[in-house]
Amino acid sequence: MEWFLVLPTLLLLTTVTNFFTIRNPLSTTAISESVSVLVPLRNESSNVNGLINSLKAQNVLTNVEFILLDDNSDDQTLKLLEESTSGLSNFHIIEGSQLPSGWIGKSWALQQLLDISKGEIIVSVDGDVRLKPDAISKSISLMKSSSLDFISPYPRQLALTFAENLIQPLLQWSWMSTVLLRVAERVSFSSMAVANGQFFVVNKSALKIAGGYESVKSAVLDDVFLARTLVASGAHGVVINGADIAECRMYASWNEIKAGYGKSLRYAFGTKFGAFLAAVFLFSTGILPLILIVTSPSFGLSAYLLIVFSRLLSALKSKGRLIYALLHPLSSALLVYLIAYSFFNHKKIQWKGRPL
C-alpha cells in the first residue's frame, strides 16, 4: 500500500515549499502612483465603523482616494458611512444602481466603483476586512518590487466558533498544499490562479485589458475567476501571505457557513464531476487515513500524520489555531457535506437578501 502515501507526501512537499517561498509584504517603499481603494457594501452596518477606522489609518499613500458604495442596503449602512466619513475629503460615498440582469451583486458594485475611480492602482477591500495601517502600502510595494500585475494578500481568517475553526483553515490549506505559488505567478496557466477577493490589489491597466469586473459579472466566485481572467489576458499575479497585515472574520456561525459555502462551492470545481473529484480528494486525504488506522495501522497513521503536518505548516503561516489540524478528518467530512449541500440546495440559497 505504499502508493497510498504518494498523495499525502506530495501535498506535504508542496506545503513545505510554499511555507518557505510564499511572498510576504514586509516593507514599504515610496508609492508615486495614484491609488483607488474600492469598497462595496451591502447590509454591513455592523462593520462600517471598524472598516472606516481601518481605512483612515492607512499610511505612506500620498495620492489615494477611498470610494465606498452602498449597494441598496436595507439597514443603516449608508447613514453610518456618511456619518463616519464626514469631513474626509478623500472619502467618497456613492449609492449603487439597481442590480442589472446577469450580474452578481459584488461584481456590479465593483464595476460601478471602477468606472469612477481615478487611481492607477486598484485596491478592493471587503467590508468585514480590517487592515493594519501599512497593509495597502506594503502590498503595493511588494507588487511593484515583484514585477507583478496583481496580488491577493490572504488575510488572517478569524475563527471563534468550533465550526469556523473546522472549516475556515481548509481554505488556505487547499492552495498551500496543491499549488506551487512561485511557479503559478509566472506561468500563464489560469487553472493555477489563486485569489481571495477580501483584499485584492491590481494595476488598473491590467484590469482594463482583462475586461474589468464585467468579465466576471455572473461569477459567484468572482475573486478566483477574476484572477483566472487576468492571467488569461496576459497578466501575472499570485496570492500572498497577508496574515500580518489584514484579518477577516468571514462567518460567525454554522448557519452563515452553510449559506456562504452553499452559494460558492457549486461553482468552485467547474462541473459536477469536478465537485465529485474534490469530494474524493477530501475523502482520500482526510477520512480514509483514519479508517486505515484500524485496518492497516502503519499506512493509515503515516498518511494521517503527513496530512496533519501539512495542515500545521499552513496554520503557522496563516496564524491559525494549530490544534484543529488534528481534526482534519472531521473538517474534511464537513466540507464534503457542504459540497453536497451546495449542489442540492442551491435554489433555496440567498446571499445578502438576494437569490443566486
Image (cartoon, rainbow, N blue to C red):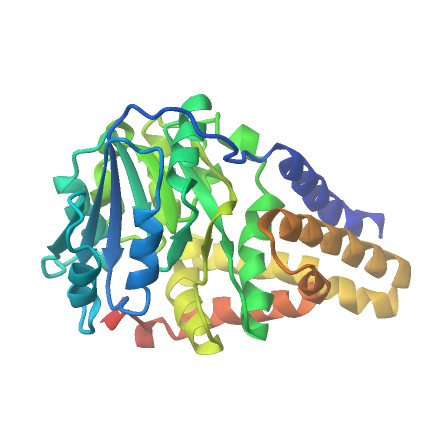
Residue 332: x %, y % from top left:
62, 65
Residue shown at 56%/73% (left/top)? 163
User: Is 5 on the left or on the right of 298, as rendered?
Assistant: left
Residue shown at 15%/60% (left/top)? 82
Considering depth in this image, is 265 or 331 the residue closer to the camera?
331
Question: Which image quarter is the C terminus in?
Answer: bottom left
Q: Is residue 32 visible?
A: yes
Residue 149: x %, y % from top left:
36, 28
Which quadrant of the view contains residue 307? Answer: bottom right
Residue extending farthest to the front is: 87
Vertical position of residue 188 compared to residue 330: above or below: above
Vertical position of residue 342 compared to residue 173: above or below: below
Considering depth in this image, is 102 or 82 the residue closer to the camera?
82
Considering depth in this image, is 287 or 280 the residue closer to the camera?
287
Residue shown at 24%/44% (left/top)? 213
Residue 226: x %, y % from top left:
33, 42
Residue shown at 26%/51% (left/top)? 39
Q: Is residue 71 visible?
A: no
User: Is 139 on the left or on the right of 218, as rendered?
Assistant: right
| Picture mark count | 0
Residue 64: x %, y % from top left:
24, 36
User: Is 179 on the left or on the right of 285, as rendered?
Assistant: left
Vertical position of residue 96 compared to residue 166: above or below: above
